[in-house]
């Protein structure tokens, strides 16, 4: 079971960073004394104080309280044509961090989504299933999502690597929002979901029953990627480009567990 990427105090911190609000201002806006506000920021749960802070930050109070109570975890299964790989990416000074990457296929054609920190599980899956890796789609170019890029390229030297045009790296093909890539009978649509990074793309997969979206670090289960300098843009693009999809759409994030559009519309403190 992959743990949630964020706790309730991480959500508070991301909202504060996006709104450029410090702890003193948060205390004033929420009607709390500074000690009570800082206690929440340090991870001490208090439902009444949490509701006050949520209202001050434009967050949904009850979903934030439920998050603090660890009241819910998604029970979401991927279809049999998708695999998730969760690899460790050590960051000095932090608890162990993991990152997700994925592969999906139709017939013998496959695409990978990001590389994670270790390409071995992905490469083994391709080999064991006899797949032709048609392309590697990068959601964005933060180090944890492209750490194993060289290893993937060594194993598949003719591989096409696609990268968001807004953060293009060497030897990759640029993608812009609104493009469609085929994978067998599947279609892969690119959607702009910048904010956490300058030009991040999400990839919406259709062509079989239901819809699935690889959203990188734009959106997490019960949270979102930090977007301190583009907070309002990130919120707007997530609502328009991701949460506008059908409620049953599976959302495959760059960190944390798989969720659905319906879950995030009702349970995510940023969007409920």
Image (cartoon, rainbow, N blue to C red):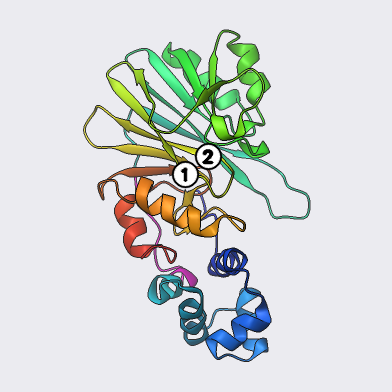
| Residue drawn at (52%, 85%) of the image | 49
Residue 48's place in the image compared with 186, above or below, is: below
Mark 1 to mark 2 CA distance (whole Å):
5 Å
| Residue drawn at (67%, 31%) of the image | 147
The residue most toward the top is 158
**Viewer-proximal residue among 192 and 161:** 192
Residue 216's place in the image compared with 263, above or below, is: above
Query: Within 10 Å of the Cα at label 1, are there few (<14), some (14-19), or many (20+) other Cα atoms?
Result: many
The residue where tag 1 is placed is 193
Span shown in magenta: 67-76
The residue where tag 2 is placed is 200
Query: Within 10 Å of the Cα at label 2, are there few (<14), some (14-19), or many (20+) other Cα atoms?
Result: many
Whether residues under marks 1 and 2 lie with C-beta atoms below 8 angstroms apart, the answer is yes
**Viewer-proximal residue among 124 and 178:** 178
| Residue drawn at (67%, 37%) of the image | 143
Horizontally, residue 86 falls left or right of residue 177, namely right
Horizontally, residue 132 falls left or right of residue 199, namely left
Residue 72's place in the image compared with 217, above or below, is: below
Is the C terminus in the top left, top right, bottom left or bottom right quadrant? bottom left
**Viewer-proximal residue among 96 and 267:** 267
Q: Position of residue 31 (x, y in %)?
A: 55, 91
Considering the whole magenta stretch, tell me its main secondary structure. Answer: loop
The residue most toward the left is 209
- Name the element at disc 1: loop
Residue 128's place in the image compared with 141, above or below, is: above
């Amino acid at each position: 079971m992959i743990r949630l990427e964020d706790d309730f105090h991480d959500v508070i911190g991301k909202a504060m960073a996006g709104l450029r609000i410090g702890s003193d201002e948060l205390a004033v806006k929420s009607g709390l004394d500074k000690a009570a506000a800082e206690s929440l920021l340090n991870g001490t749960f208090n439902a009444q104080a949490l509701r006050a802070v949520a209202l001050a930050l434009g967050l949904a109070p009850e979903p934030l309280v439920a998050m603090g109570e660890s009241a819910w975890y998604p029970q979401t299964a991927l279809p049999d044509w998708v695999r998730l790989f969760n690899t460790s990416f050590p960051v000095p000074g932090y608890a162990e961090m993991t990152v997700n990457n994925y592969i999906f296929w139709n017939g013998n054609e496959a695409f990978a989504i990001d590389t994670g920190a270790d390409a071995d599980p992905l490469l083994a899956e391709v080999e064991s299933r006899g797949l032709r890796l048609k392309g590697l789609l990068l959601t964005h170019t933060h180090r944890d999502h492209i750490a194993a890029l060289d290893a993937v390229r060594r194993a598949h030297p003719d591989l096409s690597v696609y990268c968001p045009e807004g953060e293009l790296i060497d030897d990759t093909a640029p993608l812009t929002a609104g493009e469609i890539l085929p994978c067998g009978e599947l279609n892969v649509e690119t959607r702009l979901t910048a904010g956490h990074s300058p030009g991040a793309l999400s990839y919406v997969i259709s062509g079989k029953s239901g819809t699935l979206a690889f959203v990188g670090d734009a959106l997490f289960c019960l949270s979102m990627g930090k977007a301190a300098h583009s907070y309002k843009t990130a919120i707007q693009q997530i609502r328009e480009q991701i949460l506008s999809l059908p409620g049953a759409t599976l959302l495959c994030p760059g960190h944390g567990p798989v969720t659905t559009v319906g879950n995030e519309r009702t349970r995510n403190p940023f969007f409920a």
